[in-house]
Image (spheres, helix red, strand yellow):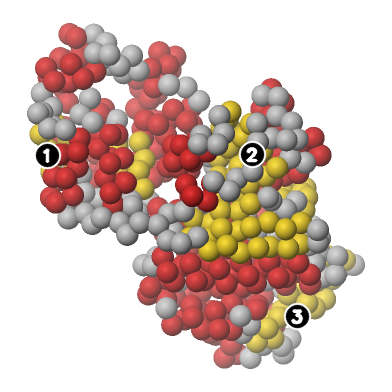
Amino acid sequence: GAGKDTIGKMLALKTGLGFLSTDEFIEISESRSISDIFRIKGEDYFRRKETSVLKAIQRLPNLIIATGGGMVMLEKNRRIIKKMGTIIHLDAGMSVLLVRTRIDRQRPLTKNRKYLKKLFRRRRGLYDFCDYRIDTENRTPTEIAKILMKKINLKSCRGRSNIQRYIIKIDRKKYPVLIGNNILAPALRTVLESKKIAIISNPLVSSLYRSKLVKALKKKHSDIHEFILPDGEKYKNVNSALKTYNYLLKNAFDRSDMIIALGGGVISDLAGFAASTYKRGIKYVIIPTTLMGQVDAAIGGKTGIDMMVKNSIGTFYQPDLVIIDIDFIKTLSRQHFIGGLAEVVKYGAIRDSALFLLLEEKIDLIKKRDPEILKEIITRCIEIKSKVVARDEREQTGHRLILNFGHTIGHAIECLSQYNIDHGAAVAIGMVLEAGIANKLGFLTGHEQQRLKDLISNFGLPVQLPQNIKSTGINECIRQDKKQRNSRIQLPLLIGIGKIKIREVKWEKLS
């Protein structure tokens, strides 16, 4: 009733910041409306969901968040909100709220006038912790947005950058990767015509970007579906794949239709696996929303799900289009941002000493997420990976194995932690330990080993095994690795910054 969503979206459009509605997040994750949640599960359940949403988004930067009006009812919610940033209370009188909400059937607590008055009195003092109070009576949303821009010193955004087009050629498949800042809408104009489109995403990413994506797609496509999967590596499994197949079958998708993967590496792996196997393959577009997805997971055509070990079931399946919008990176949590930097460091370490030096010299700009420097490093990583994949798409010659630097030990760390350690952190530790093996075997100098360790550490990534993970456990996990043969494993070993070789290493060398 106060206009939080309307004004929040206006501010996001003016400033280039992201926008998220907590109510929409809950609706997406529950697959039902707020009104139905109240009716079926009750208000107490809904308030607990609000708390879980706050915990999920509390560390996301560069974001305008519209909370539900009752979010402040719980003290623990108010404590979390206080730590998240500048808090604005959009205020309106009782009579104004009654007029604004009387035609909205989706507001479960505003249907009874008497109850609404009681609710108004209960909440009245709970907004006093806010940094600013803005009276919305007799003001339009545009006027309120202007007041807020000035009051909290928000800056207008620079707009979108030019689209850089990079063509990937692998065997007989050729497809474009479109790279730029705030390019989602114009880039989607290149999406192939399809009768139906299924957007596969997770609740958080969908609540951040669904409306922008659907709005752009509707200019050319009318039959747009969305399938939401839970977030996290533990859901990248057979059960999620089966649910995806069931959804596609129930909605009569055929081989002329298309899947769009909107999310990070988990979503692109799983959606790609579904696209490659459903009716022996349908059209597939990747829109990676994480740094790791943009530099690694979305490029190269690997798809997969986990069973016992990571990516034990999968295919090689190249997409029809990849859209790299650097604008997505601004709302990543610090953990996910620096996790993606682990893959960036990998590409410099294995193939591009100049990129590695750039990372060392521009570390402050990178940490600030400068869009121009991000565009440069993302483009260079894509160029490196696409050239490696073009030589050995299906890992038949062994050349593609160089991309696994840090991943042999990294995957074992993820597995042993039951995926409580994220992929980027695990790969960072894996690179340090595998560089140590290279040094021990005489391939890598101590100086270059230290350069790698220092760069990883300076980005805020871990460089040592957690205390609860032992090297003996890592060895057992590696025995299940796809690359092991006869107590030996094919391991990418650095022989210098920007140089790497594949060597067979015995188990005991990994101890």
- For disc 3, the neighbor class at 10 Å (few under 14, some 14 to 19, many from 20) is some
Q: Is residue 401 left or right of residue 396?
A: left
Which residue occupies the extreme right position in the image?
Answer: 486
Q: Which mark is residue 442?
A: none
Residue 70, quarter of picture: top left
- Classify mark 3: helix, strand or loop: strand
Q: Nearer the viewer, residue 228 or 150?
A: 150
Locate residue 92 relative to residue 211 in the image: left or right.
left
Residue at 23% in and 31% down:
3
The C terminus lies in quadrant: bottom right
Q: Dots 3 and 1: beta carbons under 8 Å? A: no
* Residue identified by numbered label 1: 133
Which residue in the structure is indicated by mark 2?
A: 193
Residue 133 position within the rendered picture, expressed as x and y whole percent measured from the top left:
11, 39
Which x, y percent locates residue 218?
51, 34
Residue 176 spot, x, y in % from top left: 64, 58
Quarter-wise, where is residue 4 in the image? top left
Q: Write down the residue under mark 3.
A: 501
